[in-house]
């Protein structure tokens, strides 16, 4: 493209208000349409995605002019990073724009599990008045195990403290000082598995975290444990979760993410004790505005020759 004139493809739904820095910029032409709808893939300098677009080697081979891929969100597992690097394409994300929304959604999941709110809601709307079926348990004094103590895990722990929940944390990268400052107890994986009433994962999906809560580790959890995944499908192994829900070892699970999405046919959804949402933890007005404006600014800076901050 001519100097000072850039073409940007936004291939997943994104906040238009957040895209304003690109849409209102005469230097750039910003096109919002899917990959399938785009015939001139080779002409774009930048690609903005959420999670619906998978940025594969094949796609990058077609986008011969591509210089930067920006993920309006945190997880970059839908982008073949190594392939991008090989082609000299920079990958950036919006690391903190949806932290609060995701922590809040996770907390909503915790309360939903403890008080069976989704199940009771479904029942009363089915014209039943069943007060016995929905006895719950208090959260005060319970132990919440947080696996992965980055931005989201930390924000979650603050919220848990206000409910008088004990927080145990497993994170190989966390220092004792930071744990103390956040008022949480550092534990190794086995200790956290054995002590938690509620276990929630907040790690990226990598080869080390894939299946982290699988048969072997779920066996080490307390009978009656609640498991939560608002991070990435596959960190909790779905087959293992299925078996342990069926046996009753796991009392309930709350899932916002799945190994395969959309997850309409997922067998876990058949369990009454599974609370599920369709990958909406980051779907708030605030978070979507934040992530879209963060990546818009990043892409503009980069195209104007400044180094990318969040690569
Ligand atoms: C993320 O990684 O930021 C989340 O999965 C949210 C999203 O894709 O919108």
Image (cartoon, rainbow, N blue to C red):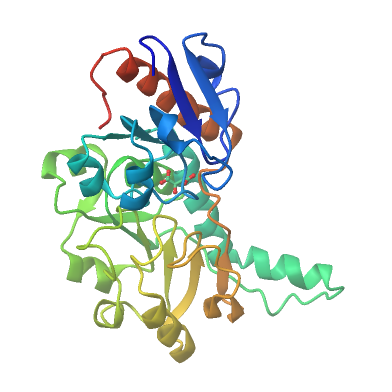
Q: Is residue 72 visible?
A: no
- Specify the quadrant of the image occupied by residue 150: top left
- Specify the quadrant of the image occupied by residue 239: bottom left
Q: Is residue 42 visible?
A: yes
Q: 234 or 84: which is nearer to us?
A: 84
Quadrant of the image containing the N terminus: top left
- Most extreme residue toward the bottom is 247
Identity of the residue drawn at 23% across and 48% down: 83
Instruction: Say above or below: 246 vs 52.
Output: below
- Specify the quadrant of the image occupied by residue 165: bottom left
Identity of the residue drawn at 20% across and 53% down: 171
Quadrant of the image containing the C terminus: top left
Instruction: Say above or below: 69 vs 231.
Output: above
Identity of the residue drawn at 31% across and 54% down: 167
Q: 294 or 188: which is nearer to us?
A: 294
- Most extreme residue toward the right is 127
Q: Position of residue 147 (x, y in %)?
A: 28, 58
Q: Is residue 263 left or right of residue 89?
A: right
Q: Is residue 88 left or right of residue 299?
A: left
Identity of the residue drawn at 62% across and 68% down: 116
| Number of marks drawn | 0
Q: Position of residue 29 (x, y in %)?
A: 52, 19
Q: Position of residue 232 (x, y in %)?
A: 39, 58
Q: 272 or 28: which is nearer to us?
A: 28
Q: Position of residue 231 (x, y in %)?
A: 39, 55
């Amino acid at each position: 493209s001519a100097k000072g004139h850039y073409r940007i493809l936004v291939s997943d739904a994104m906040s238009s208000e957040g895209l304003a820095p690109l849409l209102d910029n005469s230097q750039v032409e910003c096109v919002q349409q899917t990959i399938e709808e785009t015939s001139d893939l080779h002409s774009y300098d930048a690609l903005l995605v959420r999670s619906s677009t998978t940025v594969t080697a094949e796609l990058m081979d077609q986008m011969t002019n591509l210089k930067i891929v920006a993920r309006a969100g945190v997880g970059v597992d839908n982008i073949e990073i190594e392939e991008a690097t090989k082609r000299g394409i920079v990958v950036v994300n919006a690391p903190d724009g949806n932290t609060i929304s995701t922590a809040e959604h996770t907390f909503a999941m915790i309360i939903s599990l403890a008080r069976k709110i989704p199940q009771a809601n479904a029942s009363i709307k089915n014209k039943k008045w069943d007060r016995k079926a929905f006895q719950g348990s208090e959260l005060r004094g319970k132990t919440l195990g947080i696996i992965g103590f980055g931005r989201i895990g930390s924000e979650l722990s603050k919220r848990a403290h206000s409910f008088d929940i004990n927080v145990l944390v497993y994170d190989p990268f966390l220092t004792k000082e930071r744990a103390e400052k956040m008022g949480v107890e550092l534990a190794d994986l086995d200790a956290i598995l054995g002590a938690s009433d509620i276990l929630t994962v907040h790690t990226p999906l990598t080869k080390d975290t894939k299946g982290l809560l699988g048969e072997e580790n779920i066996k080490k959890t307390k009978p009656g444990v609640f498991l939560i995944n608002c991070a990435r499908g596959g960190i909790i192994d779905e087959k293992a979760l299925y078996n342990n829900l069926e046996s009753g070892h796991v009392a309930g699970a709350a899932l916002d993410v799945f190994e395969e999405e959309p997850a309409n046919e997922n067998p876990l959804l058949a369990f009454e004790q599974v609370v599920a949402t369709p990958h909406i933890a980051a779907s708030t007005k605030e978070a979507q505005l934040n992530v879209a404006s963060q990546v818009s600014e990043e892409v503009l800076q980069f195209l104007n020759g400044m180094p990318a901050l969040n690569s």
